[in-house]
Amino acid sequence: MLNINYIKEYIEKSIQENWDQPAFSDYQGKTFLYKDVAMQIDRIHKIFDVWEIKQGDKISLIGRNNSNWATTYLATISYGAVIVPILADFATDDIHHIVNHSDSVMLFVGDSIWDSLEEQSMPHLKAIFSIDSNNLIVSRDGKAERRYNDMIQTINEEQKVLTPSKILYPEISNDKLGVISYTSGTTGFSKGVMLSLNSLVANVDFGRNNIGLKPKNNVVSFLPLAHAYGAAFEFLMPFSIGCHITFLTKTPSPKIILQAFQEIKPRLVLAVPLIIEKIYKKQILPVLNRPAMKVFINIPFLNRKIYQKINKKLTDVFGGNFLEIVIGGAPLNKEVEDFLRKINFRYTIGYGMTECGPLISYIGWEKCRAGSCGVLLPTLEMKIDSNYPQQVAGEILLKGENVMEGYYKNEEATRKTIIDGWLHTGDLGVIDNDGYIYIKGRSKSLILGPSGQNIYPEEIEAKFNNLPFITESLIIEKQNKLIALVYPDLDAADEAKLVSADIEQIMEKHRIEVNKNLPSYSQVAKVRLYPEEFEKTPKKSIKRFLYQINEN
């Protein structure tokens, strides 16, 4: 077990030491001090007592990122109950299924989501509360409801004497279950990742020791908090330090995210590649492609000045105050990364998965290497299932403090994923002599060439995605041929007054151009236009298994 503090001590100490400092803000809304968070945690603990919630009981939580969501999460794990965070975008039936499958006894839910739920479809819940109004919505225990009504009459008076020294939460061993995080809600495919408090502490502790945040630093939370990446590094770790976290509270479009960055000027920025790539493609690439700019960039002294100006402009886009931008969740386009390195931009790439709560590897931006996702966390062991792990990609296998206990009530999936104590990630990678990890793709998406060659579709997709009039692409195999499904950039096509036939001709030219830079066994035989964005996971990775086409 980790020889570090319990998670409850991180929560206690941060509240005690930052009592009068801002803790949470809802974007363009209310701000809560650390003492306000303490009072809300106290209220929720009393609610748990009233409904006789025990340590180890499951509490479901669903809603958009906001202060009350975060406080409910903290109250649950500091009480010793198990939080079941549910993604707000899951379908109604999936939400019902997760609440039931997780054996949750209480639900905290956003009002807009509650409107689509059915109380009778979640028969085992003792009570349901709104995380927007804090009100009781449903109670199935009349005595508990009467005790609750009595409690809310007196709680304000009791909390008037709440002081930092009185913030003491129950002792809970780090080996206890802390979170069940569902990667899918669909019946029959439910995979509730069981993360111990040890896994949470390992991630929080690593972030505290390596990322450089300090008390009162600003952080913007826009990644879904129900996902391990956002929860650990936009919420739990900054809170434990004493940062001021602003929750966007609404669907985080790039426009809203960048507006918030300008106003709040966060000290740390987490990002998925999609955001970085869109900014590069829409704002930077058009400037670089101007004829005069192409000339200037080839002049040694002048190009340094140009790159410095672009670096400043890009830095200002993200608020101008960040230590670094940590990119994760999916592969970053190689052309985009090469450009970020050329301008000396403060970025790094991490690697993680929900099953590790989530972080697996990271290194600070100054030591970041092109194409790498950093080095392994000290709380983990890793091996690559390859005879030549420095040259030949193999599946990444892990064990250690961060690794999940298994999938809740899904022994078959657990047995297939944790074999002889090693977590099989499904990711393919190599490692260099200095311990830097390089991800080559997903083992499930790997395509075998005609003579057994390994084809990584993500690498081909990255080449297509850099080209004009392409929003995103997906490489699939059909009848031993590679097909590129392409969702075109319809806005750009409209501006250029292109019709369907024009787009098809452009895509064929793109196919020929891409193939010039590919070995013969991984060349694309055909491009098919796709009418809408590809469906994605919370990490913004395309759900590849959904896309098949029929070829004659």
Image (spheres, grey):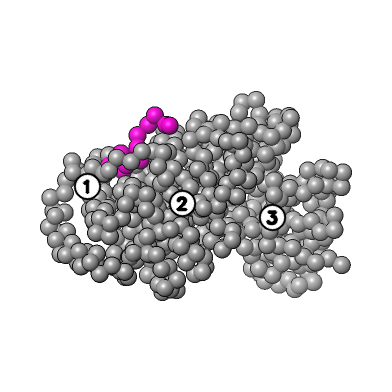
Badge 2 amino acid: Ile
Q: Within 10 Å of the Cα at label 1, are there few (<14), some (14-19), or many (20+) other Cα atoms? A: few
**Numbered circle sitting on residue 187:** none
Q: Earlier in the sequence, mark 1 or mark 3?
A: 1
Residue 410 position in % (x across, y down): 55, 52
Badge 3 amino acid: Asn
Label 1: which secondary element: loop
Q: Residue at x 71, y 67 (%)?
A: 530
Badge 1 amino acid: Asp
Label 3: which secondary element: helix
Residue marked by disc 1 = 20
Q: Earlier in the sequence, mark 3 or mark 2?
A: 2
Instruction: Say whether residue 9 is magenta.
Output: yes
Relative to residue 493, is residue 26 drawn left or right?
left
Residue 215 visible somewhere in the drawing: no
Residue 533 position in % (x across, y down): 64, 65
Residue marked by disc 2 = 180
Residue marked by disc 3 = 465
Relative to residue 185, is residue 171 drawn left or right?
left
How far apart are the alpha carbons under marks 3 and 2? Answer: 35 Å
Q: Within 10 Å of the Cα at label 3, are there few (<14), some (14-19), or many (20+) other Cα atoms? A: many
Quarter of the image where the N terminus is located: top left
- Mark toward the viewer: 3 or 2: 2
Tell me which segment is drawn in magenta.
1-12
Q: Residue at x 52, y 34 (%)?
A: 400
- Mark toward the viewer: 2 or 1: 2
How far apart are the alpha carbons under marks 2 and 1? Answer: 32 Å
Q: Within 10 Å of the Cα at label 2, are there few (<14), some (14-19), or many (20+) other Cα atoms? A: many
